[in-house]
Image (spheres, rainbow, N blue to C red):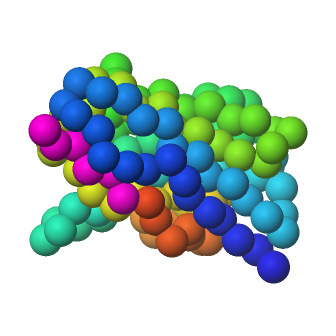
Amino acid sequence: QVQLVESGGGLVQPGGSLRLACTASGFSLDLHAVGWFRQAPGKEREGVACINVSSGTSIYADSAKGRFTGSRDSDKNTVYLQMNDLKPEDTAVYYCATGWGCGWEIQATDFISWGQGTQVTVST
């Protein structure tokens, strides 16, 4: 069974950090791209990062550049999103999804399988 599971969300103060994990089962992430998306209440889903698992290269939305970093651990079949200097506007449900490559823009329509999401709340 193909499955993606996100973990690592939680409550953090502004300026803090979290590391999200996206673990796949039933298939290998090695030949895929993994996108990270987020959706805040009342807002559209936004792509924040895309990691090409085979090459390790990544692209980021402007809102994530300089603060978020993607990485992968092939042995664990897991992709991570390190989020630093978090801001209240980063509060959202974060999802990972798999596709075949990272395009010029991180668009949800390019991704096939999705996880259930993990809540990130940045607040005092």
Along the viewing direction, whichever of 122 and 4 lies nearer the viewer: 122
In the picture, the quarter occupied by the C terminus is top left
Q: In this view, does 122 lie to the left or right of 114?
A: left
Q: Vertically, is 37 above or below 21?
A: below
Residue stretch rendered in magenta on the structure: 119-124
Side of 7 where 78 appears, left or right: right
- Residue 70, horizontal then vertical, whole percent: 54, 33
* Vertical order, 116 against 51 (above or below): below
Is 46 drawn above or below residue 122 in the view shown? below
Q: Residue at x 37, y 29 (%)?
A: 17
The foreground one among 9 and 2 is 9
Residue sitting at x 61%, y 52%: 22
Q: Which residue lies furthest to the bottom in this view?
A: 1
The location of residue 90, given as percent across then percent down, is 24, 44
Inspect the magenta stretch and tell me whether residue 102 lies in it: no
Q: Residue furthest top?
A: 66
- Residue nearest the observer in this picture, 93 or 35: 93
Left or right: 104, with 6 as reference point: left
Which sits in the foreground, 72 or 32? 72
Q: Which picture quadrant has residue 123?
A: top left
Residue 115 visible? The answer is yes
Question: For residue 120: magenta?
Answer: yes
Query: Is 78 displayed left or right of 113 in the figure?
Result: right
- Residue at image position (62%, 63%) is 5
Q: Which quadrant would the N terminus be assigned to in this image?
A: bottom right
Res 46 visible:
no
Q: In terms of image quadrants, where is residue 16?
A: top left
